[in-house]
Image (cartoon, grey):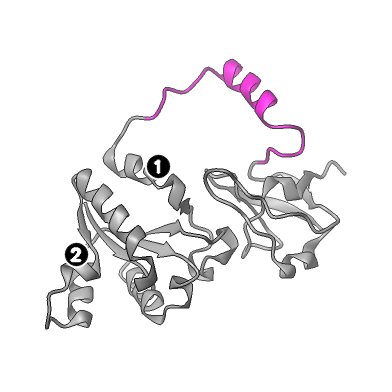
Amino acid sequence: MNIFISHSSKDKWAARRISEDLQQHGHEVFVDEKDIKTGESIDHAIKQHLGESEHFLILLSPASLKSEWVLMELGGAMALGKTIIPILLYVGANEMPQAINLKLARDINDVEKYYDEISGKPKDPPKSKTAQKNVDKKAAPKGTSFQEGDNVKVISSEPADALRDTGLSIYWHDEMNTFLGQKANVTSVNDEGVVIIDIAKNYGWAPEWLIHDRS
């Protein structure tokens, strides 16, 4: 698979690491610092490699979110219909650009899951429904497990950020205070447990910030 890595120059170390990992998995990777030759047109090289790539991996960090070049590359990838792969570096789900904030992102510490997905690594066999039901009851306390179509209510007071030891952290923003105490409907829940509700689709909601609405 051909993969284009978009990143800020301040995040070269992370881009290099991901590039090396992907090449070890047998993939072709484009990273501007190693693939654009001296004297070559940067704009032409990027357009060429972006067109040849199947996946557009964007390394989202405080620096890249301010980079006009990175955002231009993102716009080009979306226009070409590329598969967008957001990888988060020191930012949370709600810092993602609005155009892609509903896409499943991976934290840099959890990027190996993306490697496994594109390398065809088999997943663990599913457990029986009975066994899975017992696991779910132990792992998810009442009020923290949601699925599409559930009626929910946003908690009434501003919560702490939902920080995870591994995987995707979710940060509360002041603008979200507008929805405190409001009723909503769950429109989707991604693999990382980020909940999207109909009254505020531009934000990702941690399960801890919602309760089931039985009324």
Q: Nearer the viewer, residue 213 or 37?
A: 37
Q: Which mark is residue 52?
A: 2
- Residue drawn at 69 percent across, 25 percent down: 137
At numbered mark 1, what does the secondary structure look like: helix, strand or loop? helix
Q: Which mark is residue 113?
A: 1
Quarter location, residue 204: bottom right
Q: Nearer the viewer, residue 78 or 11?
A: 11
Q: How many marks?
A: 2
Quote the CA–CA distance across marks 2 and 1: 24 Å
Q: Which residues are magenta?
A: 123-146
Instruction: Please provide percent x and percent y for residue 87.
Output: 43, 57
- The reply to whether discs 2 and 1 touch (Cβ–Cβ < 8 Å) is no
Can residue 56 be seen from the camera position used here? no
Relative to 178, say whether 166 is above or below.
Answer: above
- Residue drawn at 54 percent across, 61 percent down: 91
Relative to 142, say whether 74 is above or below.
Answer: below
Relative to residue 185, is residue 120 drawn left or right? left
Q: Residues within 10 Å of mark 1 (few under 14, many from 20)?
A: some
Can residue 145 be seen from the camera position used here? yes
